[in-house]
Image (cartoon, grey):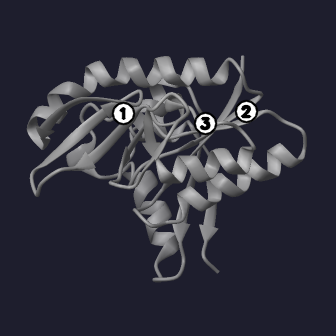
Amino acid sequence: MTAALMLQGTSSDAGKSLLVAGLCRHFANRGFAVRPFKPQNMSNNAAATADGGEIGRAQALQALACRAPLSTDMNPVLLKPASEIGAQVVVQGRVRTTCNARDYHKLKPELLAAVLESFTRLGSGADLVVVEGAGSPAEVNLRAGDIANMGFATAAGVPVVLAGDIEGGGVIAQLVGTMALLEEDERRLGKGYIVNTF
């Protein structure tokens, strides 16, 4: 079974994308076949894969850090904002639909299956998969049907390291507060903390 590690953040802009890229390069330099993975990303900045699919630009950077070709499995769900209330939903590199937040919420159980399929397929050709969460796992309004953070981690059984950004202050409260809002089975997946942006 391929090893995996997930980096989640106490908030958006906690530095998850660059931390994942750094870990990818570190393990690639040590001779491991490493792949980046982000279950769900929201960005209008997409990169094209060799087969014409789309993934987030952050995952393209992380793939470069791994010295690996881009794959749509690296970012199986990409949300591309299309209006103030809707987004284009790209699944495994191909546009699936455009919907508002309520309709997307209904779609998430189906999307989790695609996310797990991509994760398994990506891991079959790697020694290590480094996973990036999205936003924060403690956003209570987004917890139901989550596929981006602890919903994915628990479904896939992936250990989690939580990163917080010290630059704005209050990083200890961010880390402790995030963990306090998680369920007990989710807290058990936690393996450590990163204090970022010194």
Circle 3: is it few (<14), some (14-19), or many (20+) Cα within 10 Å?
Answer: many
Residue 8 numbered mark, or none: none
In percent of the image, x 39 and y 20: which residue is there? 114
For the view shown, which residue lies furthest in the right direction? Answer: 30
Depth check, mark 3 against mark 1: the one in front is 1
Depth check, mark 3 against mark 2: the one in front is 2
Q: Mark yes or no: residue 192 visible.
A: no
Q: CA distance from mark 3 to mark 1?
A: 15 Å
- Is 60 located above or below residue 77 in the figure? below
Q: Mark yes or no: residue 124 visible.
A: yes
Which residue corresponds to mark 1? 147
Which residue corresponds to mark 2? 128
Circle 1: is it few (<14), some (14-19), or many (20+) Cα within 10 Å?
Answer: many
**Dot 1 or dot 2, earlier in sequence:** 2
The amino acid pointed to by label 1 is Ile
Circle 2: is it few (<14), some (14-19), or many (20+) Cα within 10 Å?
Answer: many
In percent of the image, x 42 and y 56: which residue is there? 178
**Dot 3 or dot 2, earlier in sequence:** 2
The amino acid pointed to by label 2 is Leu
- Is 146 located above or below residue 120 in the figure? below
